[in-house]
Amino acid sequence: NQELSALSDTIFVTIGVDTEGAAPTGGGLDFNSMEYLMDRDIGDIQRIQGIKDISPIISGGGVIEFNNEMKSVSLLGMEPENMKAVFGLDSLGLKEGVFLKQGDQNKCLIGHNIAHEYFDSDIPVGARIKINNKLFFVSGIYKEEGMGFSTQTDDSIHLTEYDFEKLTGQKNVSAAIVRVYDVEQVNAIADEIKTVINENHGADDVASVVTMTSILDSIQNVLAIIQTVLLAIAAIALLVASIGIMNTMLTSVMERTHEIGVMKAIGAKNSDVMSIFLFEGMFISLLGGISGVLIGIIGAQGFSLATSQSMGAMIQPVFTVFSIGLGITVAIIVGMISSFYPAWKAAKMSPIEAVRYE
């Protein structure tokens, strides 16, 4: 969320791709679309008031050669700073290597499948490959599936805009990254961009415009739903746990009735008896809390790995000392509250009747 918020002044523009409310994972923006923005589109967007800059994204096809093997691949060219902004969001970035920098030439970033599946041997960072018979240095390798906003990243090669045009001679603008001066105006400007492109292409819905704020809102809505569900599950779990602890402690009191009678007969006060059972309940809850935290950490990591495979992006769990301490503290408090009635019942026992109990 913090990284997306840092890009809240950014608008992504494509043609013929429905990106309304898209998330930055599989099924998002397709920069390898067969539809292209016209020079007129770029010019009209630049003239819209409030726009800071616009960076076109160009795409096409090419042939890669490695160890005397040749494969057809998708090529994408854009400014290095925008490449990192779009494809470098947290866990959606590079698995190995570094992003391209301004001024880099004859360097490229390759997708996971190209690095590990296209050829008999893997392509490592630092390897030299040929693209359309021109030598390139592999600067980095993307993580698997859905990096940035395109599921095609696994099977594409990213170049600087300069290298792309020099290599292919193509200038097919499949998308554009637009930045605005005022974040408060980003939605209004996005609507204006959409209107301009639709008018240029003579259609009502040819333009697809998505802002980072809309993506962030979608993510926050999903997280809010997940959080609500988890809180409901946690509340039910606490209720069940408290009933379980109370039943356990009541059973313990019943089984130790004679022992309680002996303690009170030799001088134990009601507060002493009550403290014994309260601390016993708290200890049981402490063990349960620690076990729950460990299971939660393992479960969260497992869920993170599962989502990385199915969604193409890893939801990285964050564990803090405060959250772990809070979980254990809540467990202890629940245990103490649940043990109060059994402890009170034990403290109020008549020592004479308790000693006689068998």
Image (spheres, rainbow, N blue to C red):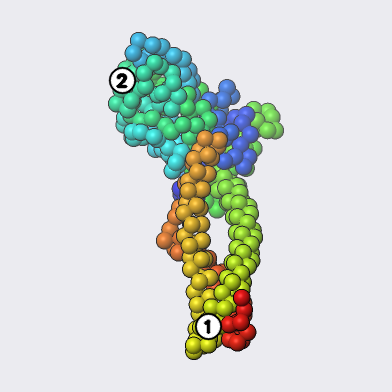
Kind of element beneath mark 1: helix
Foreground of the two, 23 or 193: 23
Marks 1 and 2: which is nearer the front?
A: 1
Q: Is residue 151 above or below residue 267?
A: above
Q: How far across and down, in percent of the image, does residue 324 sit?
A: 46, 60
The three-letter amino acid code for the residue at tag 1 is: Val
Disc 2 marks which residue?
Answer: 128
- Residue at far right of view: 204
Q: Is residue 36 above or below residue 221?
A: above
Where, by quadrant of the figure, is residue 205 drawn?
Answer: top right
Residue 53 seen anywhere in this rendered image of the structure: no
Residue 20 seen anywhere in this rendered image of the structure: yes
The C terminus lies in which quarter of the figure? bottom right
User: Seen in the image, is 32 located left or right of residue 232?
Assistant: left
User: Seen in the image, is 219 located left or right of residue 165?
Assistant: right
**Which residue corresponds to the image point at 58% horizontal and 51% vertical from the top-left?**
223
Using the numbered discs, state the Cα–Cα distance from disc 1 to disc 2 in whole angstroms. Answer: 84 Å
**Which residue corresponds to the image point at 48% horizontal and 21% vertical from the top-left?**
74
The three-letter amino acid code for the residue at tag 2 is: Arg
**Which residue corresponds to the image point at 57% horizontal and 78% vertical from the top-left?**
258
- Disc sitting over residue 207 in the figure: none
Q: How far across and down, in percent of the image, does residue 220 sit?
A: 58, 51
Disc 1 marks which residue?
Answer: 262
- Residue at far top of view: 68
Where, by quadrant of the figure, is residue 311 drawn?
Answer: top right
Q: How far across and down, in percent of the image, does residue 305 sit?
A: 49, 40
